[in-house]
Amino acid sequence: MQCKRCDVVCSRSGRRGGRAAGLIPTAPKTKIKDQTSHNIQRCYLDEPQAGGCQQDNTESNFTVRPPATRWLRAVVESKSTDVMSWSRGESGTKRSNAPNPVGRSTAEIEADLLAPVGESLHRIEFFIFEQVVGIVYYAGLSALTFGRNAAVSNNSYFHCFALPGISCNCAYFRRQRNFKPTISPYSILPQSVSVSGSGFHAEIQCGKGRSLLKMTLQNLQVGAVRLIIDEKEPLRERFRPLQALNGEPVTSDFISTEIGSDMAVLKVAANKEVVVMFKPLRLDMRNQSTSTTSLHVMLYDNQLLFIYRELEDNAEPKPLTLFNRLFDYVQTSVLKWLKPLQSEQNPADEASENKNYEQNQGVAYDRDGNPINDAEHPLEEGGGVEQSAHEEEDTDGLWTEHFHSFTDSKPYGPSSVAADISFIGFRHVFGLPEHADSLVLRDTNQTDPYRLYNLDVFQYEVDSPMALYGAAPYMIAHSAKATVGAFWLNSAEGWFDVSYEPDDSSLLKNLFSRFFANDKLPVAKTHWMFETGSVDIFFLFGPKPDDIFRQYSTLTGVNPLPPYFALGKHVSRWNFIDMNDVRQTDAGYDLHDIPYDVIWLDIEHTYGKRYFTWDPIKFSNPTEMIRNISAKGRKMVAVIDPHIKKDENWDLYQEALEKDYYVKDVNNRVYEGWCWPGAAVYLDFLNPEVRKWYANKYQFSEYKGSTEDLYVWNDMNEPSVFSGPEVSMPRDNIHFGGLEHREVHNVYGLFHHMSTFDGLYQRSNGKKRPFVLTRSFFIGSQRYANVWTGDNAAQWSHLRISNPMVLSLGIAGFPFTGADIGGFFGNPDDELIVRWYQVGIFHSFFRVHSELNTRRREPWFFSEQTKALLRDIVRLRYSLLPYWYKFLRFYEHTKNGWPIVRPMWTEFPTDTALFNEEKQFMIGRCLMARPVTEPGESSVHVYLPDEKSEWYDWFTHIPIVGPGVVQVATPLEKIPLFVRGGCIVPIKERMRRSSGLSHQDPFTLIMALNKDGTFANGTLYLDDGDSYEYKNGKYLYQYFVYSGDKKSGSLMSTTMHPNANYNTNAWIEKIVILGLQFYPTDVHVFRADYVPKKLNFVFDNQKMMLTIRKPEVPYLFLACNIVTVILKWRNGLSSLVMRKSENIDCIMSVVLEKCQKIFIHRDYSSGMAVRFQTKLPPELVGRVR
């Protein structure tokens, strides 16, 4: 084998370029010079002291390091019959004892230990001692189990285990993760610093070389800052996925700036500032208004690793990569165990520490902030990485990388980029969807890192950080004192390390001694690594969950209000056989009295997998089929994938070919892969013309057989390529503008469903709301499509993991998500299908879906008992649709970006007991669910938070006072569902065949009073459920409030937006009040004539529940901005007492005649409530607002 850097030829081949232990290199054939410094480079094959071209050009051999070998043998011999193995379970990393398998000998086990690691033996030693891992290996890495599912072919995807450099088939990640400099060589040139309005500008140098990078820090109006770092003189522009943003962010001038010789303090808002340290480059985000936690996010020892290497011998010149001339810095790895020593210096503050840096050349810090202060760790003269005797260059995969039979040519060379972001004062970090893993990001010190690379994963494994279908490089850190966030606009492959630790190192003490009283600070350290791209990071200041949701949604957009039917039940499988199958399935739901809204068609409905077509035999009359469905208020969805069948006789294929609309391979030929149609080509959605052309294909004139009731499912858009590396497209494929696929991979799906959304919008001339489901997604996808969690399995583990997956998606800006109920693969038994329905109705997207070879899933294919249970569960979902709908509209998601299905900590941000909770969650602010996700679970523990709140069992209406844990019995028919005290929940109790047929049906108000029985409020949103007329004021948004005491109470309705108007026949049919604290004797309604009219009611004195049936208020949505208008007796004289409502944003004169009021009182004769005057007193007219 031959060294890529210096052409060292090894005597025998071996793993990773022949660098296996024991190889003896010959003399280097040539010397390679760095094109920048003109100094001869060193090249290490294994031992740093030997092999390859060194500065003195001497030759020496290298051998396996005996200490490592002896240590490994000692491990095997001492643990041959009782070896520790490690596996990941639900609660994290678990240790288990496993016997020596099949009586293997010490030599055999040692051979397996050595075989996969080869040249990396000294890395094993380094890792074990650095991390104090202990004895964790036997029989090679195959003994390390991480809960992998047998259905997943691990060999099909990149993976990198915890041990640095071992079994990692991703070269740039291996280099990034192993790289641990003593101190960042990047620094700001003080003379380059300038401030203009909202921008801080500077140039960055590496070591003592000339400036290479330019930096801009923008202050954003929304309450965030944006860091952009790019090459000063770019030789090739890096791709930035700006389409992920919801337009260009609005900037705001800095309030004040203080620029010194070694730092800059930028005040971005009241009590919020950014401190930029010049040497080494570091950014500190501080919020001084949140008690002692004044510094939340720190871009710390900003490790921007941009890789460059010179051309191979006799190679044609190729474009240089961004941030070149940094080869020395990024190619080296400090592999010696770095022993932290306590620094003796005691700087007065952070500024002085950095100011005195050059005078304290003996002090250095590694990436984790540990001080290094001894003779073994001198700093390089250039201020860069320590040159240790144990360095080794990892050159494997620098220029050309191999994965199975695939070759990545890397025509522009390696170009990875990384940064450390530490959340100071935090122990919980969330985000980074999509992963089938816990809600809280795990510590990855001893596991695989989290990976974001959109892939088609067959029956994915659970409790795993492996890449799935979507990517959102966004983290949220939360504590009882603050919530902050960071996201990076980068669409290349990304890996993320997370570690949690109470950090009491002297560095952090010195940095934060002014802001923290506690010496030991909890720190969530994260390391972000991308294959390519530039730095474009947004830091969100928070400091509360609602601030974070508002800031992120303002920057990236919100999910537009979906059509009302989208919240109903979706019926799908791969595949309904033909039109008759569709008709019988539709009729079956009617026969068994189970509502549903949408029926789906998978790929078999097409003519030979040609999308935008119909099978001429099985689906010969699609227009009639769709109209028969829509006659019942139902809709249809058909799948349309991004690949195009290669068929020279197909007009669509030929048209796109002639227009040059397909993705090209590395040789600039149309790339041909293999997917459902067989040979297939892939549309290049990076081209704006392609997106426009594709959107036009949804016109009724183009998509024959479609109607306005047919919507779209975009699948396989990672993109999925059965014949490609990792079941996807080669990374060196070429897109529009000469972009490599590696640069744009994670936004390919975004551009696909963006085109589909535009097509559906345009086909109705902007009148109808589109509905699009996508499997692949990126930041910003929420503006165009909804998401589901992909190809899960009919297993309890997949049911359990669906909740944290949906919760993670929700807080990352995707509110309309769900999992395939029952599992896509396999056949659920009766218990599993019932429990899965009970979970699925509390996810925004409620779809039953399964693959081709599974048994039918319709409820009537199960037992009669199961069918009845499934019917009741579906009806519960439909009764709650008004509640779901309003949370997707005003002041929850559309206005403030709140997730609908949300983690408990978002509603109770100071209750630390809830930070790890993922089985129990909120739906909006009023409903809390804790569905069963384990087989045979006869009871569950439910934690009721908030000492000020009372909780009510949704089904029994029994109140339970929090906070505390209660045990709830969970027979198969039981769903632990609770309504929060202080809430008014609108529901519909009349069941129709579909949600569209219930639009004019009456409402029931469920009023759950607070702990004192004095207050409850809520809202209801109503529009036509289909069009964009709500943007023109055609809607109703009502506010309800109950106020009272232990003697009487009143309920008022108020319009939130008085200028909005929507005609409806809907009315209030029933009012249920929970937690009433007095025994009512009469209930009256006051109508336009202000004459009280008695109403019939039923009071349950055991549950303290009042039910008012048919209050005869045909139209309770009338304009009045007074919540409470109470006439009380005062000293025998009557007086009018008025209070303006809270949270009312309408300003208008009171028109009392339009108010309607219900009085609930104990004794009407006592004068607690009397007739209203027909007119306001003259002195009050026009004064009440």
Image: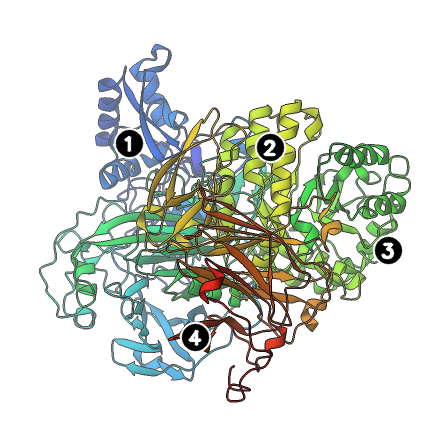
Whether residue 395 is visible, yes or no, is no
List x then y, in percent, for residue 1026. Answer: 73, 59
**Residue at the disc numbered 3:** 702
As shown in the figure, which amino acid type bears the numbered disc 4? Answer: Gln
Q: Nearer the viewer, mark 2 or mark 3?
A: 2
Mark 3 secondary-structure assignment: loop
Q: Mark 1: which amino acid?
A: Val
Instruction: From this view, report whether residue 222 is shown above or below residue 591.
Output: below
Please name the amino acid that badge 3 sits on: Glu
Q: How many marks?
A: 4
Asked which quadrant contains residue 720, the reply is: top right
Sequence-wise first label, 2 or 3: 3
Residue 519 drawn at (x, y percent): 16, 57
The residue pinned by badge 2 equals: 823
Is 693 placed left or right of 43 in the picture? right
- Asked if residue 297 is positioned above or below residue 944 in the image, the reply reads below
CA distance separating discs 4 and 3:
45 Å
Q: Residue furthest bottom?
A: 1179
Q: Position of residue 788 (x, y in %)?
A: 60, 45
Which mark is on residue 64? 1
Residue 790 at x, y percent in the picture: 60, 40
The answer to whether marks 2 and 3 mark residues whose Cβ atoms lie closer than 8 Å is no
Q: Nearer the viewer, mark 3 or mark 1?
A: 3
Q: Earlier in the sequence, mark 1 or mark 2?
A: 1
Question: Which residue corresponds to mark 4?
Answer: 218
Query: Residue reaching furthest top?
Result: 103
Rounded to the nearest angstrom, the CA distance separating label 4 from label 1 is 51 Å
Between marks 3 and 1, how big is the CA–CA gap?
67 Å
